[in-house]
Image (cartoon, grey):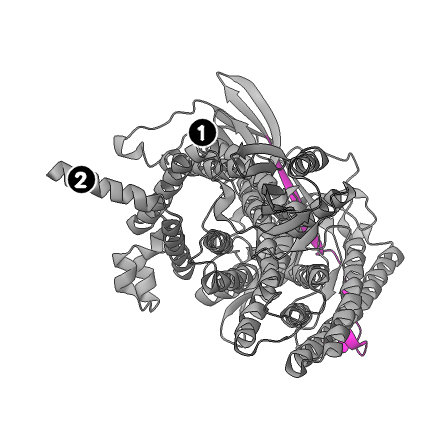
């Protein structure tokens, strides 16, 4: 019976069977041992990084409990060193995989932890002597690293067809950049909400803040949301454009899409409330923190929600 | 009387819908609805929901929670947001051309004592602000002179522009909602298939109007590409993972015949109209074909294998999704995805793969559930014996599955979205300053009052005031800071 194969385009090579191609085993073994070695090194470094984030987190907590500035300074310095090491690890992973390192949840968790830590450290240069926001950021970074290491596979796999798009890098980089900015903004807002009543009651200095400096400190949270909001808008927009190219529909009310819209809407509410004297106080602070919670839902919670409720998601490759 | 009541009601509604406070309430309500939409599976069936033990059958039915995003409650909320956005945009348009209110009502941000005469102080301050710092005068009265500085357009204009862009996005969404439709199309190699849609947009559906695209699609070629890649054998238990991290346990990778990942699949398409090929394109995921207002997307492919059993001249045909009863075998067989096309080896070389599939047999697992185990690898033309029966893969067929869509709202949404992003980025990442100053002389003391407002992330009021102070000092005015609440 004649074989009716579709016309095959591409490389003009003679057909060979797969077992025939595996004859040169030494080359394959070399590749496997190299891949295994690099991944082992990466995993050891990643565990170390998670551990050091944990130490930083404990020092930040001790700083808050004891009000010791030296504890805060130590935590801050340790986090700087660790974040730089983490960036190095991500660069290492990029070379190891030969592509942008945010295909799987393992990779995006690592990216999220590093970008949040680094963004915090850069922003913290603007309010030297205030270390309390570092507790939330280092705690989240540690949690993200541990979740990646304990629950996800570090396997490096080729990009699936829907991810082979020019949107892949830009969509993910800018979305995660906005996430990092919102994490830092929420940590500043939470510090403000915790410290403001103490200062109002007793005055003086609390965790490096005074009545004169606390509002200026809080304005950083607003500026960070202003910074992150266009990035999130771009992420939602580029995600829709990408979905239109890949799935033929720019919006499917997929849980991930819907939660990204919820996050965007809550931050829209926050920005509007900041323009109104009646709402720009605690209400706006609550919206900022709610926006952060929604952002975490978009990133992680929605996977859990979809699994719990059995709702199919088109974003399964990100799980 | 009735008219007056109606006018009052309209006035009240207009006033409410032009308020930012209303925006907050509507956005809050929409957020709540979005959350509900992620809790109930959208597009689900009420009967299935009830049968699965759903506890909120009454609410699900009453509020169409399984089709929430097309339900009346959601459409009302979306309409309210649209009206709010349109009215706010229209309402704020005249403000773009209005002059700023005089600054007398503001407490000066900073006041400086000057050591020069009134006239000289005015001249030097204006020169410093306009020539030194690039401010432009926007208003002037007997006491206060107001100036502005910023990148292209005023921040109010940019704020207005990105809100107007969002209003255009909503029009795009409305067009999609009313007119868009989509369907799927399966094409076999070498066959021209007419595009005949059964689906139709919401607006045309009640009138029974059916679009007639009037062209056919021909599948000219179908290509699949695979990549051979190592697979990691990673333990599932947490202690083992920690042990690997600590270096107490090693990692293992494996790579064999089955370590193939589907990298891509492409369909070479021809648009046939009036017997002529009017357009040709090889499409893949992320790269669709556009023609006549329609966009054709690579959605997937389907495969059929033909298996010869022993020496039977008539082969059995099987879809990969279905089980195949094979004479002589106790249990039916099911086949894994047929691998054909090109394969990229780890060293980067490309080879043509001999087509093969894996035959699987059902077994009952320890948990009583049915599962499939590999029974044999069937390569094209090479017989394999499974349980005493000789099976040969003699042929296969591949079809491409396309989804296509007609969406007149997308272009407007796309361009309006780009417009929103550009205006928003300039507005948020630019720095705008508004400065108002007043110089007074009381006795021999000349005092400069400065009021500063700033918008945008890089804007820094303190930095600007310090710079002005420095420049005025350099200009030999020698200012001294005084309490702004003097």
Q: Which numbered marker is on residue B6?
A: 2
Nearer the observer: mark 1 or 2; the answer is 2
Does the magenta segment cover residue B266? yes
Q: Residue A175 at what x, y percent from top left?
A: 61, 52
Q: Nearer the viewer, residue A212 or B394?
A: A212
For the point 62% across and 49% down, the residue is B457
Is residue B187 shown to the viewer in this render?
Answer: no
Span of residues in magenta? B242-268
Count of labels shown?
A: 2
Q: Residue at x 42, y 37 (%)?
A: B92
Image check: A121 left or right of B139? right
Q: Quarter of the image containing the N terminus of chain A?
A: top right
Find residue A265 and report its horizontal and vertical position in percent.
47, 52
Secondary structure of the residue carrying tag 1 is loop
Dividing the picture into quadrants, the one containing residue B254 is bottom right
| Residue indicated by mark 1 | B195
Q: Position of residue B32 (x, y in %)?
A: 39, 58
Residue A85 seen from this side? yes
- Identified at 73% across, 55% down, the residue is B257
Instruction: Rate crowding at label 1 as few (under 14), some (14 to 19) or many (20 or more) other CA atoms within 10 Å.
Output: some
């Amino acid at each position: 019976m004649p074989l009716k194969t579709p016309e095959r385009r591409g490389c003009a090579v003679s057909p060979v069977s797969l077992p025939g191609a595996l004859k040169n085993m030494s080359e394959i073994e070399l590749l496997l041992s190299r891949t295994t070695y690099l991944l082992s090194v990466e995993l050891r470094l990643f565990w170390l990084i998670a551990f050091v984030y944990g130490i930083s987190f404990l020092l930040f907590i001790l700083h808050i409990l004891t009000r010791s500035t030296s504890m805060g300074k130590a935590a801050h310095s340790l986090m700087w060193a660790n974040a730089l090491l983490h960036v190095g690890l991500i660069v290492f992973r990029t070379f190891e995989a030969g592509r942008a390192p945010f295909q799987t949840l393992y990779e995006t968790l690592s990216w999220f932890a590093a970008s949040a830590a680094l963004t915090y450290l850069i922003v913290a240069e603007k309010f030297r002597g205030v270390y309390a926001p570092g507790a939330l950021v280092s705690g989240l970074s540690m949690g993200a690293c541990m979740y990646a290491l304990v629950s996800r596979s570090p396997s490096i796999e080729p990009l699936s067809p829907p991810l082979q798009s020019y949107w892949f890098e830009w969509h993910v980089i800018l979305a995660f950049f906005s996430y990092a900015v919102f994490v830092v903004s929420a940590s500043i807002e939470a510090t403000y909400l915790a410290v403001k009543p103490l200062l109002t009651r007793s005055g003086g200095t609390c965790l490096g803040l005074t009545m004169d400096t606390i509002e200026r400190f809080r304005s950083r949270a607003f500026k960070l949301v202003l910074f992150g909001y266009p990035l999130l808008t771009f992420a939602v927009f580029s995600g829709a454009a990408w979905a239109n190219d890949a799935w033929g529909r720019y919006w499917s009310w997929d849980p991930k899409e819907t939660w990204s819209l919820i996050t965007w809407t809550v931050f829209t509410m926050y920005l509007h409330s900041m323009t109104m004297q009646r709402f720009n106080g605690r209400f706006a602070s609550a919206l900022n923190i709610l926006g952060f919670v929604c952002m975490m839902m978009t990133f992680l919670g929605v996977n859990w929600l979809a699994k719990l409720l059995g709702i199919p998601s088109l974003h399964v490759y990100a799980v | 009387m009735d008219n007056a009541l109606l006018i009052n009601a309209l006035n009240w509604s207009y006033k409410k819908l032009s308020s930012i406070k209303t925006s907050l309430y509507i956005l809050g309500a929409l957020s709540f609805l979005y959350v509900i939409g992620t809790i109930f599976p959208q597009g689900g069936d009420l009967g299935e929901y009830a049968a699965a033990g759903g506890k909120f059958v009454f609410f699900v039915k009453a509020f169409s929670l399984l089709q929430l995003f097309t339900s009346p409650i959601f459409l009302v909320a979306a309409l309210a947001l649209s009206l709010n956005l349109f009215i706010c945009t229209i309402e704020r348009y005249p403000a773009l051309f209005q002059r700023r209110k005089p600054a007398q009502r503001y407490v000066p941000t900073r006041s400086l004592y000057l050591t020069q005469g009134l006239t000289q102080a005015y001249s030097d301050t204006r020169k410093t602000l306009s020539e030194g710092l690039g401010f432009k005068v926007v208003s002037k009265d007997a006491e206060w002179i107001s100036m502005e500085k910023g990148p292209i357009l005023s921040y109010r204009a940019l704020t207005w522009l990105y809100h107007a862009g969002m209003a255009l996005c909503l029009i795009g969404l409305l067009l999609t909602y009313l007119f868009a439709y989509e369907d799927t199309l399966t094409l076999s190699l070498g066959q021209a298939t007419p595009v005949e849609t059964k689906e139709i947009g919401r607006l045309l559906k009640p009138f029974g109007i059916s679009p007639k695209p009037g062209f056919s699609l021909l599948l000219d070629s179908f290509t699949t590409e695979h990549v051979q890649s190592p697979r990691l054998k990673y333990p599932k238990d947490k202690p083992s993972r920690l042990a690997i991290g600590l270096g107490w346990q090693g990692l293992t990778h494996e790579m064999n015949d089955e370590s193939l990942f589907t990298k891509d699949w492409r369909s070479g398409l021809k648009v046939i109209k009036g017997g002529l090929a009017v357009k040709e394109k090889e499409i893949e995921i992320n790269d669709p074909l556009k023609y006549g207002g329609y966009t054709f997307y690579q959605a997937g492919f389907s495969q059929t294998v033909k298996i010869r059993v022993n020496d039977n001249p008539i082969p059995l045909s099987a879809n990969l999704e279905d089980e195949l009863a094979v004479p002589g075998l106790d249990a039916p067989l099911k086949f894994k995805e047929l691998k054909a096309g090109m394969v990229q080896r780890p060293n980067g070389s490309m080879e043509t793969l001999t087509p093969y599939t894996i035959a699987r047999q059902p077994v009952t697992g320890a948990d009583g559930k049915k599962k499939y185990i590999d029974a044999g690898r069937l390569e094209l033309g090479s017989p394999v014996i499974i349980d005493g029966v000789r099976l040969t893969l003699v042929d296969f067929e591949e079809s491409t599955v396309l989804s296509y869509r007609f969406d007149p709202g997308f272009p407007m949404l796309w361009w309006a979205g780009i417009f929103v992003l550009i205006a928003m980025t300039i507005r948020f990442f630019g720095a705008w300053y508004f400065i108002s100053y007043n110089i007074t002389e009381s006795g021999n003391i000349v005092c400069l009052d400065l009021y500063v407002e700033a918008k945008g992330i890089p804007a820094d009021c303190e930095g600007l005031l310090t710079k002005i102070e420095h420049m005025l000092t350099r200009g030999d005015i020698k200012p001294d800071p005084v309490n702004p609440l003097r």
